[in-house]
Image (cartoon, rainbow, N blue to C red):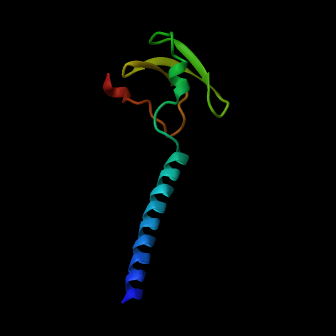
Amino acid sequence: MKVIKQSSIAVALLGVLIAFGAFGHDAAAQERRGHHGPPPEAYTACEDKSEGDAAEFVSPRGDTVTGTCEWEGDRLVLRPDNPPPGGHRGRNDNDD
């Protein structure tokens, strides 16, 4: 009886460890895919600028990103002239 109880506890602990391992792996995978939305530099590039002004910043990869400042919520953000593939501009161009 004591062996069965210890085995049950061991199986339960193993299940918990597997569950936490899967959660940690999923969070790490999501981090590797990157965050969604503009990088902080896109907001910094438009500080002290007006909507429609040209701006640029150097990306974490070392590329110079050029674009135009547009409102996103209550902040201006640089919308790149050449957005990365698979990215979106945050709004539908048909929303006008």
Residue 52, position as x, y percentages in the image: 46, 12
Q: Nearer the viewer, residue 31 or 54?
A: 31
Residue found 52% across the figure and 46% down from its top: 31
Residue found 67% across the figure and 30% down from its top: 62
Q: Nearer the viewer, residue 10 or 53?
A: 10
Horizontally, residue 66 falls left or right of residue 30, namely right
Residue 72, position as x, y percentages in the image: 40, 23
Which quadrant does the C terminus fall into?
A: top left
Res. 66 in view: yes
Q: Is 11 situated above or below 91?
A: below
Residue 51, position as x, y percentages in the image: 44, 12
Residue at the limit of the structure toward the bottom, as seen here: 1
Residue at the limit of the structure toward the left, as seen here: 95
Q: Is 10 situated above or below 59?
A: below
Horizontally, residue 35 falls left or right of residue 56, namely left
Which quadrant does the N terminus fall into?
A: bottom left
Q: In terms of image quadrants, where is residue 45?
A: top right
Residue found 48% across the figure and 37% down from its top: 87
Q: Nearer the viewer, residue 40 or 5?
A: 5
